[in-house]
Amino acid sequence: MNAVRRLSLVSNEVFAPMPEQRACALRVAIATQDMKDLNAHFGSARRFAVYDVTREEWNLVEAVAFDDVSDESGEHRAEGDDRITPKVDALKGCHLLFCLAIGGPSAAKVVAAKIHPIKVAEPQSIREVLLRTQMMLRTCPPPWLRKVLAQAGVAETKPSFEDED
């Protein structure tokens, strides 16, 4: 059995499995071993730091921790021993997933959950990832991000060029 632990910052409100997304925020999950850096492959990540990111700020939403992770050997366990589905289920509601690597079957499950995986070539601080995400939001986002923003309901409305006479 794969135990999933969630650490959320809560107020006096009733606890929910995944805190409500802030208005106009992009929900970002970052694969981490230490809650300081993006430094894990999707399958071997012991934790995911989940943030709501806007053009002006970011806020930690929760940390999701897992006991049963991959050893990065590339070998699959016995059939029926699924470590990926609980991770994908725990990250539902996120729009972007940053990790060092993700296998094809895992990426397919992540995309099916409407989460856009982004592979980063080398470890970097979570702060750097969040700053880069904000920069993409502030400037002209690439087409793939515009699509994610539109699906998330975060995209700015385009002006209408039709006369309203």
Image (cartoon, helix red, strand yellow):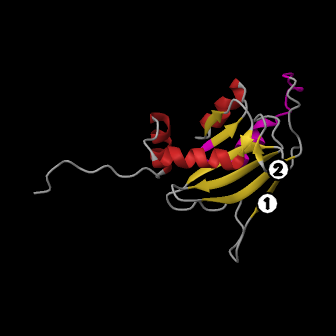
The quadrant of the picture occupied by the N terminus is top right
Q: Position of residue 77 (x, y in %)?
A: 89, 26
Q: Name the dominant secondary structure of the magenta segment.
A: loop
Q: Position of residue 154 (x, y in %)?
A: 47, 52
Residue type (three-letter) at the residue carrying disc 2 = Ala
Q: Where is mark 1, residue-wise?
A: 7
What number of labels is visible?
2
Image: 117 above or below 157: above
**Badge 2 is on which residue?**
65
Q: Position of residue 140 (x, y in %)?
A: 42, 41
Crowd rating for badge 2 (residues with CA inside 10 Å; few <14, some 14–19, many 20+): many
The answer to whether any part of residue 75 appears in the image is yes
What is the magenta range? 74-96
Q: Earlier in the sequence, mark 2 or mark 1?
A: 1
Q: Is residue 76 left or right of residue 51?
A: right
Separation of marks 2 and 1 at Cα, in angstroms: 8 Å
The picture places residue 121, in percent across and down from the top left corner, at 69, 29
Going by the numbered disc 1, the residue's amino acid type is: Leu
Q: Quadrant of residue 79?
A: top right
